Image (spheres, rainbow, N blue to C red):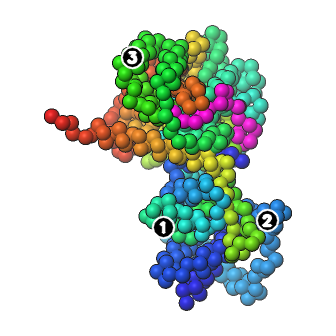
Amino acid sequence: MKDDASNFLPLAPAALHILLSLAAEDLHGYGIMQDVARQSEGKYKLRSGTLYDNLQKLIQRRWVEELGQRPGDDDPRRRYYRLSSLGRGVLAAETARLATVVREARLRLQVAKPRRA
Amino acid sequence: MLRFLYQGLLRLHPPAFRMRFAEEMQSIFDQVTERSARVGLLADGFLSLLRQWSMRPEFWHEFASGGEHAASDGIPSFYTLDPYRPRAAAVVHGLILTMAVFCLTCFAIAYGWIHVLHVSIPEVQVESSPSVVPGAAAAIPDEREVASRPGDRTQDDFSGSSRSSQAPQTQAPDPKPFTAAEQNARGISRPAPPGRAGRRARRASAFNTAQNTASQPKGAPESSSQQIASLGSGPAGTPVQPAASALPLVPNTKIEAAERHRVIEAAVADLTRYYVDPDVAQKMAAALRAHEKSGDDDAATDGEAFADLVTQQMQDVSHDKHLMMIYGAAIAPESPQPPSAADIAAYRKEMERTNCRFEIVRVLPRNVGYLKFNAFPDAEICGPQAVAAMARLNDVNAIIFDLRDNPGGYANMVALIATYLFDRPTHLNDFYDRDKNTTEQSWTLVPVPGNKLADKPAFVLTSHLTFSAAEAFSYDLKMLKRATLVGETTSGRGHMAMGRRIDDHFMIRVPDIKVVNPISKTNWDGTGAEPDVKVKAADALATAEKLAESKLRGK
């Protein structure tokens, strides 16, 4: 199943952070929450309700795959999640979009700077 | 106590969500020991409860996708409903509640002074429009769709694209203009342009290589035997392969003068060969070389900065927003693969899900038709929806097309919808391909039998977010004096650009096809389509309604 990623851009902050967390490694829900807090230096607190609401959508869009439980984990209730190749593509698209925004913003802020007489 | 409350909250969630995530949410709650954090989770759980019941009806019964989980040992495990058999008392309560709600609803329908229920039965206008596909009209919702808006920022050109011939034949929207025989005999398939990815590739969205066919109007001269089928792809109208999903995000590497020189020479070669305006291409080439010679590029020692600098240098000369040097890693393969059957199926599914982006089909006061659509999707797939929408508006006295949120799409849909405004096949546009030195024509189709809109006043609402094929529709109708444009100047994207690979890290996006209107002999690129009545986009509908009213009164 492939989807038109650009239809879903820009991503909501929660979805972006979740995809970003899973880009590095497979994680369980609590791991994602901790990683998001680390990414944003504690400025963005993703809580479980928001996390699973987003995971539900991301799984449905097939951007994230559910891996199930891992034997030997501290808590057997944990399930792990993995970024799919489609999700990786969406993340790359969003990152590129943000890069364009940042570049444009820099350009405009530079232009807006008062020139020295 | 908090744990007990949280557990209760989780139990109140929709069954599908609860079965899938409640355990994990509880596990997270147990892991958190700090009281304030637990209170935060509780509040978030409450919000989640409201959200799940009010905004996520599509997931309420989603057992199918949640029912199968690959277990860690690779053997899939399945949920069954057995452990969730409801208690007998619950069934009785449910029965009583259902009866009560049913009786109340019947009472409200029969005696309510406000008609809370509008049950609209789709009408099939057999006499006036034999082309209507039964049931298609039912697919047109009257209320705004909740589907995601097309990513209008990503649509930046007509990327001419064509669906590969193995694409499944779709139900023709109109037996007359879209017979399979005509499609095969007269329609053309523009070859999938290799590397037509450009900035989209950089965005790691996929390449659109879908192929269209469009039928030749019967009245069109034989010399115009070729007709551009697609004004391009966009967020709305693009079968997509996630080819770019493998794009790695690489660090920005340093580049040397030799590489800069090589990139500039490749850019010069591509510009002089492909750019739609050869004179401007020469000027840009000279400017790039002059900058290099004078050492202006020396400061740009990393790839991204250099790409931006070259982009700026090219745009300073051409003022063409499509021209761009792009830096990335392994941006595009030499020739993108045509879309697979799965891509086409995914596109079709997405279109079905969003009703082909036809958002509102409505008859306004004074019998003015209003059609808001947020893309020009492939007519081969969305023809029935377009035909049904137009059929529903067949008896109006005037028609308003709302393109304020329309980022464009396919030329065959432009031609299909425009067909309803003319009583004969009408020449809309020419597409000039610099590289091939060919010009292809786009015409409206054979008039639809029973169509009553050909002589009715038409209005097109535009905004600065009206892009690409939507601009073509606006501009063409304006040039043909067939519609009054109301709103803002459109974005000004009238070229089709293609990304061309220079090396693993650099790509250049060169507009190589331009749209030429047969009346103005030019297009709207850079300037946008100017409205006849300039008002803010937000006021465009009210203004158009007033204009329609005064026009109808004057008749």
Give the class, few, some or many, for how many residues have Cα within 10 Å of label 1's Cα (few <14, many ≥20). some
Magenta stretch? B327-345
Give the class, few, some or many, for how many residues have Cα within 10 Å of label 3's Cα (few <14, many ≥20). few
Check whether the beta carbons of the residues at disc 1 and disc 3 lie within 8 A of each other.
no
Q: Position of residue A1 (x, y in %)?
A: 72, 47
- The C terminus of chain B - image quarter: top left
Residue hosting label 3: B293
Mostly what secondary structure, the magenta segment?
Answer: loop
The chain that hosts pointer 3 is: B
- The N terminus of chain B - image quarter: bottom right
> What residue sits 48% from the left and 67% below the top?
A45
Which amino acid type corresponds to the residue marked 3 in the rendered image? Lys
Q: Nearer the viewer, residue B32 or B488?
A: B32
Q: Position of residue B358 (x, y in %)?
A: 56, 44
Camera-nearest label, 1 or 3: 3
Does residue B120 lie above or below B417 as drawn?
Answer: below
* Disc assigned to residue A45: 1
Check whether the beta carbons of the residues at disc 2 and disc 3 lie within 8 A of each other.
no
Which amino acid type corresponds to the residue marked 2 in the rendered image? Ala
Residue B59 is covered by the magenta coloring? no
Residue hosting label 2: B71
Query: Which label's residue is closer to the chain start, 2 or 3?
Result: 2
Q: State left or right for residue B553 relative to residue B358.
A: left
Q: Position of residue B128 (x, y in %)?
A: 63, 36
Element under disc 2: loop
Cα gap from disc 1 to disc 3, whole angstroms: 52 Å
Cα gap from disc 1 to disc 2, whole angstroms: 30 Å
Camera-nearest label, 2 or 3: 3
Residue found at the very far left of the displayed protein: A117
Does residue B482 lie above or below B53 as drawn?
Answer: above
Check whether the beta carbons of the residues at disc 1 and disc 2 lie within 8 A of each other.
no
The chain that hosts pointer 2 is: B
